[in-house]
Image (cartoon, coloured by chain):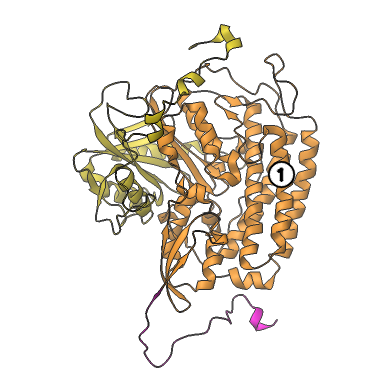
Amino acid sequence: MRNKLNQSDSQSFLDSISSKFSNIVNEFDTLKINVEASEWTETMSILKNEFELTYFSWLSAVDWENEVSVGDPPKESVNPHFEIICCLSESVEGNLVLVSTKIEKDNPSIDSLVNIYAGSNWHEREAHEMFGIDFIDHPNLTKLYLPDGYEGNPMLKSFELISREVKPWPGDVDVEGMPEDGKEEGDS
Amino acid sequence: MDTTLDPNNKPFVSDASVSVEIETEDMTLNIGPQHPSTHGVLRLVAKVDGEKISSVEPVLGYMHRGYEKLAEVRTYPQITTLVNRIDWVSGFANEIPFIAATEKLMEIEVPERAQHIRLILTEMARIASHFVFNGAYALEIGALTPIFLAMEDRERVLDLIESVTGGRFHPNFNRIGGIKPAAGAGPTTKKDIQDLPAGFYEETRIVMEKVLEGVERFENLVGGNEVFKVRTKNIGIITKEMAEDYGVSGPILRASGVKFDLRTKTDFLPYEKFDFEIPIGENGDCYDRWYVRLMEMKESANIILQAIDSMPSGPLQTKVPKVIKVPKGESYVRTENPKGEMGFHVISEGGLGPYRLKIRTPSFSNISILPELLEGQLLPDLIAIMGSLDFVLGDVDR
């Protein structure tokens, strides 16, 4: 049993984070710090130097939009914006934080983290091509996955899936109960 | 000992400086996307100055299937099928983080027996994945025999996975709240819930003994080979700082001397019940990365042997609603995949499918270090360095 999880360490980490940052959410074992976009790089420097979160895990974005062409829209109406999420960790106790910020949808841009975490380079390129977000001072903000000349940003909620336009996905039919399970059918 | 065979004394690399300054021009060399050592369809645009690499730019996207977008139009049970195909060498291990993140949002407690079976199959996937690496890496270095031995050993493990799940590469075996009734365990009716196939424990013991034998054989056959040592020792050194900065994880991070294994740091599977070591390397070179993976196979086999001896009884599945709706919220769960940290960030708005699913794959971050790592290296070392990172292009491109 030498590999027992150390609960007290993660509690003291949580306490020190909450004493430094005011807007934090800790739900479903996921600690999330909400910051202003203007404090983006500054926050990362603090987390890297003061909290020793030297391990860069990932960076991505979320397109919050009420009118969507794919999937389901949010249940409650949201103010359309991009949410940028960056995941940092350290490699001793495994403490992990998500750092989140909101940016405008018109000319979306945010400071690049390449000078703080070199690993954010490709993640930012991916977010750039998928969402159309501009990362200021990024050394090589070109397409990562998509071919040259590709137009559009596929991960936007307004971007249609072509196969979906041709034929609706029968996913709703699939999740209904099998015919012989008549008794248990429906939402329980 | 003959000095030409000493791995620490690199006799083949002579100082190429000449007294006369000659104007040279870099040559652009396209490697891939079909080169057999690229494990798929990775293309490297390398600028070389003679034998020396001056810069490398990986070109991705040949395998991009847009899983993050697809996940937005699929229901939660359907996504399990998709995530199997991210890293096809260890399909089963991919399912765990997604299922765990969903269960966390739904606040489901999974039965202990289901957790144990998940753990056993995850470790089997790790052994199968590392066998592929061991065989393929030796092949890239120039030894033909190990790949045949590795494939034979892996086949036994895949047979075990198949006997339980019905699938060799893409088991699609996890269900939200537990696991699917095992294949080959009798007719599927709701009255008699199926379990592991008959003779599974005995068969597993035999196969794990063979795995341990296989590991020892590799240690002698490949690790004892002087050519292999010269090609891998002190080649492609990744320091601890560099690895963390790029988010390099898994055996590569551990080879750089960081004793960090998510199996002991998270509670996604009951690893705390078992006794195992975390092998780490010293130099962070190609040899260490190879050696750490080899030792991990040994530990995985030991975990499986412990797990089948302490298998709890009970149900395989908790009661979940017929139509899976995940409550509003977001959760990030990461697990130790054979290749490193694999995580799923699920944002649910209370619907049948996620509003956004971010897939963090280990190989993507692991190879993002390539431009910095390969700069200034010799061209023949490029294959040795790339192979030691053990990436799968499905895992890079998603």
Left or right, B101 with respect to B215, comes to left
The number of discs equals: 1
Query: Foreground: B332 or A184?
Result: A184
Picture quarter with the N terminus of chain B = bottom right
Q: Which chain is yellow?
A: A
Number of residues whose C-alpha sits closer than 10 Å to that of mark 1, classed few (under 14), some (14–19) or many (20 or more) = many
Q: Which chain is orange?
A: B
Left or right, A175 with respect to B214, comes to left
Query: Mark 1, chain letter?
Result: B
Q: Magenta region, mostly helix, strand or loop?
A: loop
Image: magenta residue range: B1-27
User: x and y percent of residue A27 in the render?
Assistant: 40, 29
Query: Foreground: B320 or B170?
Result: B170
- Where disc 1 sits, the SS reads helix
- Give the residue type that dot 1 points to: Val
Query: Foreground: A45 or B19?
Result: B19
Q: In this view of the protein, can residue A1 be seen by the observer?
A: no
